[in-house]
């Protein structure tokens, strides 16, 4: 076994548990059955997720056979992702919860001739105050993207743009001592 494999397996098992819970509340026993993991492994991972605030416990279940279980739920506001659509005349920024439901949205206009530097700088300025706790930011562009390069966006008149350079943070305002 390579170093790091156990951490990768643990990460995948956590992802499997969270994936099943996205479909609705389940007990630890349900998660064990669905994932194929030992009940002790599920309990350990669920305890971690509860401590991290990603899950919450709900009502007790009373199955016809066996011990009662506690339903586990994804905590709705625990994590969210940011998404942006950079369009010809404006940008839309929104936050999505675990279930893919929109938590909030912002929209602003651009001059048609605004270049990529101006548009991405504004996107970062709008995103940074909202980014606390976000899983990440994804964005779409109206053009052909291959890997980290925008090859051509005819409606924006952009060609051969390295998108990795768009990740740079704008300068932060100076703080008072």
Image: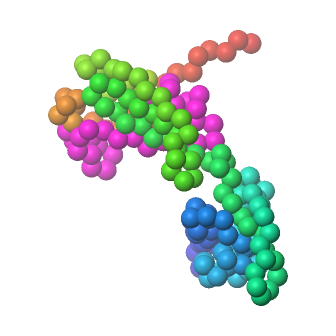
Q: Nearer the viewer, residue 133 or 107?
A: 107
Q: Is residue 174 left or right of residue 93?
A: right
- Whether 100 is drawn above or below 3: the answer is above
- Whether 120 is drawn above or below 62: the answer is above
- Whether 168 is drawn above or below 102: the answer is above
Q: Which residues are magenta?
A: 123-152
Residue depicted at 56% across the width and 47% down the height: 97
Q: Nearer the viewer, residue 93 or 12?
A: 93
Q: Quadrant of residue 62?
A: bottom right
Residue 10: image location, x then y, percent: 64, 69
Residue 131: image location, x then y, percent: 58, 36
Quadrant including the N terminus: bottom right
Of all residues, the one furthest to the top in this rendering is: 176
Q: Is residue 141 magenta?
A: yes
For the question of whether residue 20 can be seen, the reply is yes
For the question of whether residue 3 can be seen, the reply is no
Residue 49: image location, x then y, percent: 72, 60
């Amino acid at each position: 076994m390579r170093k790091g494999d156990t951490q990768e397996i643990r990460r995948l098992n956590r992802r499997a548990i969270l994936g099943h819970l996205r479909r609705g509340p389940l007990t630890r026993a349900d998660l064990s059955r669905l994932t194929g993991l030992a009940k002790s492994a599920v309990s350990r991972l669920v305890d971690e997720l509860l401590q991290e605030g990603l899950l919450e416990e709900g009502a007790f279940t009373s199955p016809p056979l066996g011990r009662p279980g506690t339903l586990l739920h994804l905590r709705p506001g625990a994590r969210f992702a940011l998404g942006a659509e950079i369009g010809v005349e404006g940008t839309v920024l929104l936050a999505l919860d675990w279930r893919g439901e929109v938590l909030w949205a912002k929209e602003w206009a651009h001059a048609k001739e605004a270049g990529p530097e101006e548009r991405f700088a504004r996107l970062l300025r709008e995103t940074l105050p909202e980014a606390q706790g976000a899983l990440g930011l994804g964005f779409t562009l109206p053009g052909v993207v291959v890997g980290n390069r925008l090859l051509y966006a005819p409606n924006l008149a952009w060609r051969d743009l390295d998108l990795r350079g768009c990740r740079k943070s704008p300068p932060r305002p100076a703080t008072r001592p």
